[in-house]
Amino acid sequence: MNRQQWKDLLEGIGILAIVGSLVLVAVETRNSTKSTELNTQALEIAAYQELINNISEINMLSLQSRDAAEIILRMRDGAPDRLDSSRLNSAFFMLFRHGDIAYFMYERGVIDELRLRSALKLLPLSGESGRLFWAQSKDNFVRQYQQYIDRLLLEGFWD
């Protein structure tokens, strides 16, 4: 082989090496993207599972504690005492904070609006005491969450 043929052969090998490298980079990029997507999904699922666990813990409260169930009944019947009112305000704040976390997850795209609405259904806004609490305490939450809850109230979401 003469010098030109060697040069052409080496250039061909070089081009094949570059193409091969580009193919490998593309495959690795695709794998990395897929891995990132799976990690993101795992984080979203874990966050949503934590939200569901919060709902379950809140629901279990009245099942496990006779006192809690009695307070809830007295509040529904409109006959709370001072201690009941204090305890209920603490419970309401916990519920609305749960809603705030769900709204935060919605804003970040971790959950969709249907899951958000499902999580918010737990808020005590079907009764007068819950609505009064919200009116008096909503300034403790971010404006976007306040506006979202107020919009749902206007839509009759809890009616």
Image (cartoon, grey):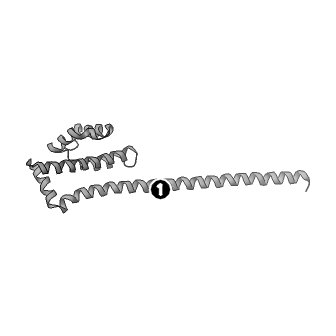
Q: What is the number of callouts on the image?
A: 1
Q: Position of residue 69 (x, y in %)?
A: 14, 57
Residue 77 or 82: which is nearer the viewer?
A: 82
Task: Answer left or right for 28 relative to 8.
Answer: left
Q: Position of residue 8 (x, y in %)?
A: 84, 51
Q: Is residue 121 visible?
A: no
44 shown above or below 127? below
- Where the C terminus falls, by quadrant? top left
Q: Residue at x 14, y 59 (%)?
A: 67
Q: Position of residue 119 (x, y in %)?
A: 29, 50
Q: Residue at x 85, y 51 (%)?
A: 7
Task: Answer left or right for 129 relative to 21.
Answer: left
Q: Is residue 17 visible?
A: yes
Instruction: Please identify the quarter of the rendering in which residue 113 is found.
Output: top left
Residue 15 or 89: which is nearer the viewer?
A: 89
Q: Position of residue 17 (x, y in %)?
A: 73, 54
- Where the N terminus falls, by quadrant? bottom right
Q: Residue at x 42, y 55 (%)?
A: 43
Amino acid type shown at disc 1: Asn
Q: Farthest residue to the right: give it.
A: 2
Crowding at label 1, few (<14), some or many (≥20) Cα neighbours within 10 Å?
A: few
Residue 34 or 73: which is nearer the viewer?
A: 73
Q: Which residue is mark 1?
A: 39
